[in-house]
Amino acid sequence: MSPEHSCANYLRRPRRGGGAPKFELSIVATSRLRESHAANAISDRGLSPISIAPARRTILAPLASRLISGGICGALCSYPLAWTHALPGAGVLVAVLLGAGFSGGLGGARRPLADLVLAGGALGIPLWLLGSCAGFRALAGQAQDLSAEAMRLHLPALLGWILFGCALGLVVPWINRAAARVMGPGTAPPPAPRDAPKRIVILGGGFAGMAAAEGLEEGISDADLASVILVSDQNALLFTPMLAEVAGGSLEPGHISAPLRTALRRTEFVRGRAESVDFEKRVVRIAPSTQRGGSALEVPYDHVVFAVGSVSNYFGAANIQRHAFDFKTLLDAIRIRNHVIEMFERADREGDPNTRQALVTFVVAGGGFAGVELAGALNDFARGILADYPSVPGGDIRIVLVHSRDRILPELSDSLGRYAQERMAARGVEFRLGTRVLDAREGAVVLSDGEIPTRTLAWTAGSAPSPWLKSIGLETDKRGAVVVEGTMAVAGRTGVWALGDCAALRDARENPCPPTAQFAMREGKALARNICRTMEGKAPVPFHFETLGALCVVGHQTACAELTIPFSRQKQLRFSGLLAWMMWRGIYVSKLPGLERKIRVLVNWTFELFFPRDIVQTIDLRSEDPS
Ligand SMILES: Cc1cc2nc3c(=O)[nH]c(=O)nc-3n(C[C@H](O)[C@H](O)[C@H](O)COP(=O)(O)OP(=O)(O)OC[C@H]3O[C@@H](n4cnc5c(N)ncnc54)[C@H](O)[C@@H]3O)c2cc1C
């Protein structure tokens, strides 16, 4: 007999002296199954009224349950790995670990099944590179060989990894749900008497703000405890690592952004620009919704999170700012693409050869990730659309990358940076290294060692945290980033937090956290956990994350990758070319939110392989062209 039935029988026993038993029955059920057992047992015995509440979740129990069920899923799905690898035992072991990692990483989030299958399959590509091409060889005591010839030998394993990933995406959510039903969500002491619900206001809907909101949605299971409000002046999360692909015409703008309202189910979204914060009254003021009026909004908070990112920094060079294109937002990328097409249209009917060449000369300032990816994408785009402009000689096209250091991509190792430069130079990109952009004027860019006649300058050479932060009285460092503790809390201000590109955050080893999407997302999740801890009366935990590596696309199906090998943080796996490019695409497709977006992007990329680039202009540049 189940405990619920025994309990109900006991309550139903006839009492001495008769009369209704004086009990108030409240049951805390540890699983849905137990909840329905209890309901049946009580109603079968004609007892009422009752209250049956699900147990409160602990953090450990659901995580442990997910890890265990994920490991089981990994073992169930390991057949393709065991089948395609020389070391089947190692394949199964890796599959179990990956299954646990996949399931644990999924958290409590519910994602469409097809989305998970596709994400799992796409992750198979980078896992193949790390596992088959490097990891399994290391386990077998063989030296690493990342040559094209050696990679080709591993191609059957690629199929194994993709099948494994898809199977994992299919099986994990089902088994997780079944495990939660059987094991229950875990129990915790009954809730303490509650204060009024807390209001958590996040400012900025980029990687950091979005991850913080997602983390809070997962961490706060009870809406009566706290509400989350996300305020952003954009209504979508922009996937910046793919921005160059929009400027280069190989992706549609809508495919690299995810609407915040759709992606966040339990967060209230306010589209608007935060213009001031009253730290005394604990209120954020949102600017009126239109320039011509509309009403301003005041949003009270218990916790406020600054995740407003960064802006382009021109170091006070007003002429450059006036003449250059920013490369930060979706609109910037759309403008650049339209402007390039406009330049080709003008060059096509230009009689003067010098003017024509200046029209199809495109200068990119800055040799970091954004600048290199943009130069690579523009080079592919300009050469790809040349066939539509018969009067423009191919030899006139110039893509010039200006960089103040002696090599590009300082984020990567020396050898990989030089490889990227060689590949881009072979495709026709010119490099002006050890050179600075000093000035810009109508028709020319002035460099520290000469001038380039051009109508196009794109600026990626500097960025700085949003200057708004300083204007509202937050303490900032010399870059303008908000000074925060290791927990992302702003010292001396209760309930004020900052993260992402706008925060001067140091990890547990006192290293500065770099302004990348990879870090911003991890910081967002960690910040959500810290806010939850604070609300539970616990101390927040300092942030620490070891980078996973870096990937950079240099154009024409070529990328450079530098990845940290798990469990061996000192060693790095470096490779480049088509495989790195496939890995880059695999990772980013898997990270794109939503199945629909993933499919659209994949279809677009496939089209791009077979058809020429589209040269339709999507915005009218006559009023806003800086040239
Ligand atoms: C072209 C380009 C390529 C990149 N490539 C990579 C890459 O390959 N890998 C990588 O890891 N990183 C890359 N990055 C860096 C990465 O994009 C940033 O580190 C990341 O976006 C930082 O996230 P964030 O949330 O802090 O800021 P952001 O993503 O900039 O988000 C800030 C948000 O706040 C909003 N906002 C600003 N002010 C206000 C206000 N007052 N009120 C309301 N909302 C406001 C902004 O509109 C924006 O939506 C790239 C960046 C660029 C520009």
Image (tube, helix red, strand yellow):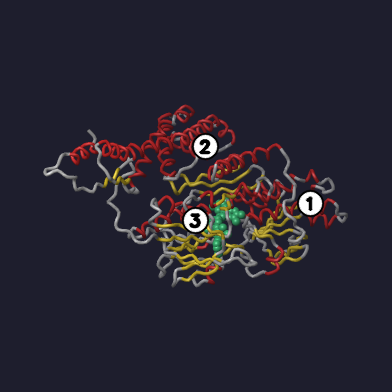
- Does the rendering let one see residue 127? no
Amino acid marked by disc 3: Glu
* Nearer mark to the viewer, of 1 and 3: 3
Q: Quadrant of residue 435?
A: bottom right
Q: Which residue is mark 2?
A: 114
Side of 181 where 403 appears, left or right: right
The residues tagged by marks 2 and 3 sit, at their Cα atoms, a distance apart of 27 Å
- Which one is earlier in the sequence, the residue at label 1 or at label 3? 3
The residues tagged by marks 1 and 3 sit, at their Cα atoms, a distance apart of 45 Å
Q: Is residue 566 above or below residue 471?
A: above
- Which one is earlier in the sequence, the residue at label 2 or at label 3? 2
Residue 510 spot, x, y in % from top left? 43, 61
Asked if ligand 1 lies within 8 A of label 2, the reply is: no
Q: Which residue is mark 1?
A: 344
Disc 1 is placed on an element classified as helix
- Which one is earlier in the sequence, the residue at label 2 or at label 1? 2
The residue carrying pointer 2 sits among few (fewer than 14), some (14 to 19) or many (20 or more) residues within 10 Å by Cα, namely some
The residue carrying pointer 1 sits among few (fewer than 14), some (14 to 19) or many (20 or more) residues within 10 Å by Cα, namely many
The residue sitting at 37% across, 41% down in the picture is: 67
Q: Which residue is mark 3?
A: 268
Residue 283's mark? none
Amino acid marked by disc 2: Ala
Residue 352 spot, x, y in % from top left? 87, 56
Q: Is 289 or 355 nearer to us in this picture?
A: 289
